[in-house]
Amino acid sequence: MRDKLYAYLLERPGGAPPRELINLILTQPGADPEFGPRFLRALLEPDPRFVWRAEDGTWNARLHEVLVRPLNDTTFVVVDLETTGGAAAAANIIEIAAARVRSGRVLEEFQQLVNPGSRLPPFITRLTGIDDAMLADQPPITAVWPRFMEFLGDAVIVAHNAAFDLGFLNAAAVAHGGRALSQPHLCTLRLARRLIPELRRRSLDALAGHFGIPTRDRHRALGDVRITVDIFFHLTERLARGIEHLHQALDL
């Protein structure tokens, strides 16, 4: 029910009044005019994805409040995972890395190998250089997850091909917190498609080559995070220049 209301509000940056939301989920709200607002408050207040704007009398997706901030006033956490190659499950994460960035600077980094409790497929070891011996004494995801969530905070998540990483992150969030992540996210792959349509390929390697970014420690989480950070900086600079040019045109 919450997911249905959240999807509805994502399409409405101006929010929606209680009666509009009640009509989505209740066919017979009842005779008590206060029942609907009380019901929604009990349903939505505990969920950090929603915010009540008393001045407007509307419920809103918190995501819209985050996205209207200037880039330099927004904290981003760039994330990358290495996995066993299996399905998007918390137990299949073998490395998490992240970098907190703001105003074009890296403020802090996070990196942790994770013991999945099972042997790695040989092709994952060949790809990443991570082997079973490296993971034997590492903590499981249950111990790593609270530390990662503390690092993440309420920042906007950034990842290259974000759908892949978010599949595993949301699986871990549900397994260890009861619900999927509520933070907004930004995908550098999708952003590159919009900002550099002339490029035929927009993989991490292709974008690094396009921007002249060194590709050290590829297929290790922290190495890929650092590459993604540099790509993100280039893309947001291009986005900011486009906005500046638009403003100049409007001034004319």
Image: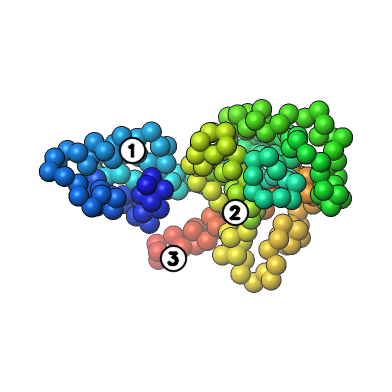
Identify the residue at horizontal 57%, vertical 33% (top origin).
176
Decide: is 146 above or below 203. above
- The mark nearer the N terminus, 2 or 3, is 2
Quote the CA–CA distance across marks 2 and 3.
Answer: 35 Å
Of the residues shown, which amino acid type is indicated by label 3? Ala
Looking at the rendered image, the disc whose residue lies closer to the viewer, 2 or 1, is: 1
Dot 2 crowding, Cα within 10 Å, few <14, some 14–19, many 20+: few
Decide: is 33 above or below 4. above
Q: Position of residue 82 (x, y in %)?
A: 73, 45
> Pointers 2 and 1 in contact (CB under 8 A)?
no
Looking at the rendered image, the disc whose residue lies closer to the viewer, 3 or 1, is: 1
The disc label shown at residue 163, or none: 2
> On the image, numbered disc 1 is attached to which residue?
43
Q: Position of residue 142 (x, y in %)?
A: 65, 30
Identify the residue at horizontal 44%, vertical 65% (top origin).
249
Q: Quadrant of residue 58?
A: top left
